[in-house]
Image (cartoon, helix red, strand yellow):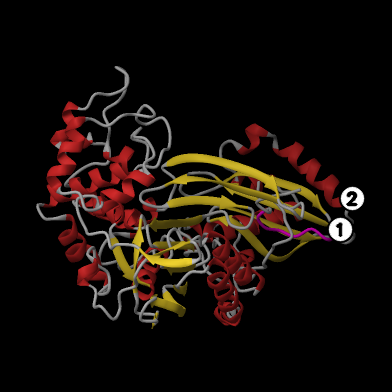
Amino acid sequence: MPRFSPTFTEFAFASAALITTAAVPAQAQSSIAPPARFTDPDRVTKLRAALPQIDSVMRAFATNSRVPGIAYGVIVDGKLLHVAALGLREVPSKAAVDTSSVFRIASMTKSFTALSILQLRDAGKLSLDDPAERYVPEMKAMRYATSDAPRITIRHLLSHSAGFPEDNPWGDQQLAATDAQLSAMIKSGIPFSNAPGTAYEYSNFGFAILGRIVQNVSGMSYARYIQERVLRPLGMTSTTMEARDVPANRLAHGYRLQDGAWLEEAALPDGSFGAMGGMLTSSADLSRWVALMLDAWPARDGAESPVLKRSSLREMQQIARFSGATAARNAAGVLSLNAGGYAYGLRSASNCLFAHIVSHSGGLPGFGSQMRWLPEYGVGIVALGNLTYTGWTGVIDQSLEILSRSGGLKAREPQPAPVLLAMQSQVTRLVQEWKQPLADSIAAMNLFLDESGPRRAAAIEQMSRAVGGNCKAVGQIWAENALRGVWRMQCTNGALSVGITLAPTEPARVQQFTVVPMRADAVLGAAPLCRQ
């Protein structure tokens, strides 16, 4: 049964009331719903109005965090709505950052590696449940921690559940390793902190192995594969795996803050660990990447992207390995939730504001970056900085809160299938006047086995009398999804909430049918994610 909350947005009432009991037109029997959609025509205008405030918090962040230079962008509906840059890309020369400046993005590279693996999977070249050693023979001699451990699969590597120990400090320094050195590391053995497939633990080593799989399966180097099969089709012309390929007047130099002074970090060359964190890109190019991910939503008919089908892009953005949840009250006493885990090369999470947040950060000596987007809202943010482990989380939180306060940050709303609207019309008639032949015509086989028709009729009549009778449907059905919805019936002295869920049959019929009294101030819609 759909839940109630103060976030209802009304839909236009359908003309399904014209449908007769005897014969429902064929088009009204369809269980195929239109894609979820945004309903506010002024949505983008409202979001654009919030951009000056985002600029303000970004400037304050750069100043307070003493980041030499930053670049950031706001993506809405696949377009770069706003891009900005400030500060220095090179401190000694005082060369300014601009929107074409290229920064290292470190572990955000992992999402490109994951997409490459899914490309090969979709082409029939591998399966995610294949043992990784099938494509990386050096792994065949690995000694597992227990005799009952499963062989490490590609899926384990993609979701950080291979059992390898967390290796961020160590992994940062492996980017320059050669193919021969990576092979030697694998052959010498990798210790296990967990049994494969039992827990989440972040592993750069695991993504280096995925890079080797891309290389061995495709027959080309990882860098070449990424360039030819991913970056070039997407028009990401500023993105590369090697700093020396970036024009000197566009390359952001990396710094650490030591004793109050900025010290330049040596540029790390690309090597066999590049698949875990070697990429460099600009704010505009990274926005194209986020736009690709956002364009996978909602599921729909139509042309696919040039690099990966939408269903696989959506697969990348959904939790494959849960990593935990926390719930706590902040200084103001407001309950805060954070729960989620790792998808494929991306993190997926929920909090009290948003049910689905996709993101990844990147940190290396000299750089820190983050990309974050809200699939159901069509909005994303990218941010690049040239200070070691630039901490973007708080300021991106602020930016999303600013967008939320603008009134333009509203999720797409599911659309009802025609058959749901047809059943709504028939059920409305039943609430007004119960007729068993009509009830039988709309009922799934379980409905009157769960509770008989006479008992349902008597309960509805009693509720209707309690609110004065003369009940009529008002406003629109709130569709939780294509085949489940709830609507309001206004009566003489009160209101009723009526909800239906349709059965998995063709044609779809009513398997669940509830009628409950509704408070005058109650509204329909999804309940808040966090409630006091």
Given contact means CB atoms under 8 Å apart, are the residues at marks 1 and 2 in contact?
Answer: yes
Looking at this view, is 233 or 454 the one in front?
A: 233
Report if residue 234 is visible in the image: yes
Residue 101 percent location from the top left of the image: 35, 77
Task: Tell me the residue that label 1 is attached to.
Answer: 494
Disc 1/disc 2 C-alpha distance (Å): 8 Å
- Sequence order check, earlier mark of 1 and 2: 2
Q: Amino acid under label 2?
A: Ala
Looking at this view, is 444 or 386 the one in front?
A: 386
Residue 105 percent location from the top left of the image: 36, 62
Task: Tell me the residue that label 2 is attached to.
Answer: 466
Q: Secondary structure at mark 2?
A: helix
Which range of residues does the magenta coloring cover?
520-526
In the rendered view, tell whether residue 451 sits above or below residue 94. Answer: above
Tell me which residue sits at (86%, 58%) in the image. Answer: 494
Q: Amino acid under label 1?
A: Gly
In the rendered view, tell whether residue 81 sits above or below residue 466. Answer: below
For residue 222, side relative to residue 259 (left or right): left
Which quarter of the picture shows residue 285? bottom left
